[in-house]
Image (cartoon, rainbow, N blue to C red):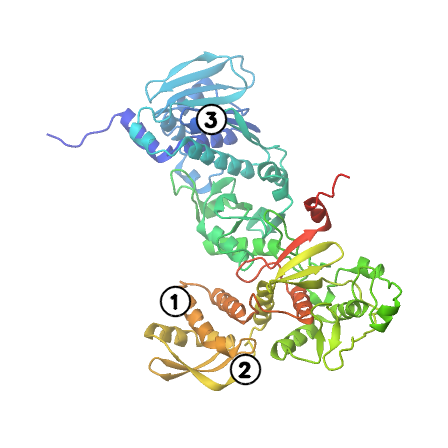
């Protein structure tokens, strides 16, 4: 007796359906892709109960003749390829010829289609993979497919579906990705009799993204445009202020096909390094065009993954295009408006050439004048500006803000090393006074102040610097800001970060594994400004530390770097250096709770203005919150009068 036998067609179709039809979203994907291949420019999708009860996909494509419609519901019948060589240059979304028979095998399936010039169309009905019923019918041009009672004859598969809401969201997400992949097609998605997605179909990707995500996200988009002859990338990415906690906003399209690829996702993550938190993901819509012969789309039954001939080239191309968009070079900006704003608000870029950038308080300087001093004021040697700021303090602000950023750096280092000096700002009045004489230090108003950057107002909770310019109010996290300043300073030192010798060397006990890490990364430690010498089997002598780091933090930073090196797997030298620089800058930066005098706040703001990426710390946390005058007016309900 033979134990091996050939399965009947109905069972074969149900097994095949398990590879193609995983859930209702898989049905929608296959049907909409067929509509797109049929040259439709309007596609409407309607579902109820998450697609388990009812799915309808209608298009205005070229339609099918009666003969083609009969063949379309048979397995491995397709119009997309003719011979095996065609698999090497596939330019359509579907090509296997499995979608319609697989769907009809596990549902109550009906198809209506009509070509131009035909009075009647063709209707085909199939229930659970049984013999089709074929007849003529009156219908509109194109094709309409209805799928009802999905998995009614495979209860085991239906039992493992998620809730209707979850399944409906999966379909919604996929319709969005399909709409992004083809902005020239108008999509409409109806979920439980409510319209969820409508796109214009005018061919403009930016308009499509605005219709999907809203105008606020549309205003936060940066264009991506790259081509080198072999391949091209177009699309949009969001500014670092507009992120989500997952990758649902990220869409990658290769030759019109929505795909998932780890190399592309990693390239995007690397381009945003230090600009967004580790748990954040930007909105990305990248449309790539490559030679069909350089990709293999016949990797997965659902065609959701593809294999590149040269994945390294694709990684570099995506990384460079995204990096150029999010960190534009040579763009001169006038103010410290490159801020992290509140959630769902947006960034503006910062100057990359600090020497040519200028501050932002020109209107306030133009309107500056003095109110005549009263007798009491003359006795106190104090006059006030129209804004109520003491004259001497205001003059001091203007002059100091016009100093070069290089001077500011030097002065900040001096203040950190020796904060106690003769010149000390009075905490209550904010006036610069001489500690010995108690007199206000008068300085001449700068004759050529250009445009001034942010002016500090004060400090809250010894943690946040409050500042202003002519148009906005700013709240600056002093630790995050100083961390960014130090990181950029360290990163600019490609050879070695300046170090300070320790008068008393520190001896650090390490484990065998940590000893191996130190030996393997000696060049890295040297470039970071640390000088380590082995003094025993598992002991190292620390002789030098970076100049900006407090002596007491030297050993702690070494140990944290070792922990990071142990946790990292197969990272590039640049990534390791970034992680170590970020940690070093974090440890060396002033902490929350540290009281700053007025001069220190000024220099920190000037330093921050000189960095290329001032709106986040190296770990992606925001450094600045910005409140424009319009936003303040809305908060205080001063609009509409």
Q: Residues within 10 Å of mark 3 (few under 14, many from 20)?
A: many
**Is there a contact, CB below 8 Å, between mark 1 and mark 3?**
no
The residue located at (25%, 25%) in the rendering is: 8
The residue located at (52%, 15%) in the rendering is: 139
Q: Label 2: which residue?
A: 500
The quadrant in which the C terminus is found is top right
Depth order, front residue of 115/333: 333
Q: Residue 19 appears at what percent x and percent y? A: 35, 35
Mark 1 / mark 3, whichever is N-terminal: 3
SS class, disc 3:
strand
**Is there a contact, CB below 8 Å, between mark 1 and mark 2?**
no
Q: Label 3: which residue?
A: 47
**Distance between mark 2 and mark 3 Cα atoms:** 68 Å
Depth order, front residue of 576/345: 345
Depth order, front residue of 136/551: 551
- Above or below for 144 versus 619: above
**Distance between mark 1 and mark 3 Cα atoms:** 50 Å
Side (left or right) of 573 relative to 17: right
Mark 1 / mark 2, whichever is N-terminal: 2
Q: Residue furthest front?
A: 376
Q: Residues within 10 Å of mark 2 (few under 14, many from 20)?
A: some
Asked if one can make out residue 92 in the rendered structure from this viewpoint, the answer is: no
Depth order, front residue of 125/196: 196
Q: Label 1: which residue?
A: 566
Asked if one can make out residue 375 in the rendered structure from this viewpoint, the answer is: yes
Q: Residue 160 appears at what percent x and percent y? A: 33, 34
């Amino acid at each position: 007796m033979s134990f091996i036998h050939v399965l009947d067609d109905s069972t074969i179709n149900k097994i095949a359906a398990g590879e193609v039809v995983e859930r209702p979203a898989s049905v929608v994907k296959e049907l909409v892709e067929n509509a797109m291949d049929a040259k439709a420019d309007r596609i409407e999708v309607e579902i109820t109960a998450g697609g388990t009860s009812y799915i309808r996909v209608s298009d205005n494509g070229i339609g099918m003749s009666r003969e083609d419609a009969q063949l379309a519901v048979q397995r491995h019948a397709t119009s997309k390829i003719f011979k095996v060589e065609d698999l090497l240059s596939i330019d359509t979304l579907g090509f296997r010829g499995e979608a319609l028979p697989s769907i009809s095998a596990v549902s109550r399936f009906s198809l209506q289609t009509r070509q131009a010039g035909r009075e009647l169309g063709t209707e085909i009905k199939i229930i659970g993979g049984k013999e089709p019923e074929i007849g003529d019918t009156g219908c509109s041009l194109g094709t309409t497919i209805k799928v009802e009672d999905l998995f009614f004859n495979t209860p085991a598969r239906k039992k493992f579906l998620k809730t209707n809401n979850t399944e409906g969201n999966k379909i919604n997400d996929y319709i969005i990705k399909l709409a992004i992949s083809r902005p020239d097609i108008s999509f409409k998605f109806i979920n439980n009799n409510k319209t969820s997605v409508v796109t214009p179909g005018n061919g403009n990707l930016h308009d499509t993204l605005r219709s999907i995500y809203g105008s606020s996200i549309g205003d936060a988009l940066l264009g991506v445009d790259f081509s080198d002859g072999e391949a091209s990338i177009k699309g949009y990415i969001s500014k670092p202020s507009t992120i989500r906690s997952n990758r649902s906003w990220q869409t990658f399209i290769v030759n019109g096909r929505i795909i998932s690829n780890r190399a592309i996702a990693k390239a995007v993550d690397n381009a945003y390094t230090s600009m967004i938190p580790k748990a954040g993901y930007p909105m990305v819509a990248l449309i790539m065009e490559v030679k069909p012969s350089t990709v293999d789309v016949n990797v997965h039954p659902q065609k959701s993954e593809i294999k590149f001939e040269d994945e390294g080239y694709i990684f570099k191309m995506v990384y460079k295009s995204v990096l150029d968009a999010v960190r534009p070079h040579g763009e001169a900006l006038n103010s410290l408006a490159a801020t992290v704003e509140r959630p769902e608000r947006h960034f503006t870029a910062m100057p990359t050439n600090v020497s040519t950038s200028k501050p932002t308080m020109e209107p306030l300087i133009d309107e500056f004048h003095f109110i005549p001093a009263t007798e009491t004021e003359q006795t106190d040697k104090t006059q006030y500006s129209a804004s109520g700021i003491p004259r001497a303090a205001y003059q001091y602000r203007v002059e100091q803000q016009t100093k070069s950023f290089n001077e500011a750096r030097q002065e900040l280092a001096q203040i950190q090393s020796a904060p106690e000096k003769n010149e000390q700002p009075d905490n209550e009045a904010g006036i610069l006074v001489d500690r010995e004489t108690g007199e206000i230090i008068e300085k001449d108003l700068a004759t050529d102040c250009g445009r001034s950057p942010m002016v500090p107002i004060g400090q809250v909770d010894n943690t946040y610097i409050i500042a202003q310019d002519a148009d906005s109010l700013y709240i600056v996290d002093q630790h995050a800001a100083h961390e960014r300043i130090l990181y950029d300073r360290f990163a600019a030192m490609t050879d070695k970060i300046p170090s300070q010798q320790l008068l008393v060397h520190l001896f650090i006990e390490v484990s065998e594994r940590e000893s191996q890490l130190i030996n393997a990364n000696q060049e890295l430690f040297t470039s970071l400004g640390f000088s380590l010498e082995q003094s025993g089997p598992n002991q190292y002598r620390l002789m030098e530390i970076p100049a900006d780091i407090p002596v007491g933090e030297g050993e702690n930073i070494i140990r944290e770097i070792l922990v990071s090196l142990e946790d990292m797997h197969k990272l590039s030298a640049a990534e390791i250096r970034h992680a170590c620089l970020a940690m070093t800058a974090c440890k060396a930066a002033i902490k929350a709770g540290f009281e700053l005098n007025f001069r220190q706040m000024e220099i920190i703001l000037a330093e921050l203005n000189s960095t290329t990426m001032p709106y986040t710390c190296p770990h992606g946390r925001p450094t600045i919150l910005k409140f424009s005058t319009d936003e303040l007016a809305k908060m205080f309900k001063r609009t509409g009068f």
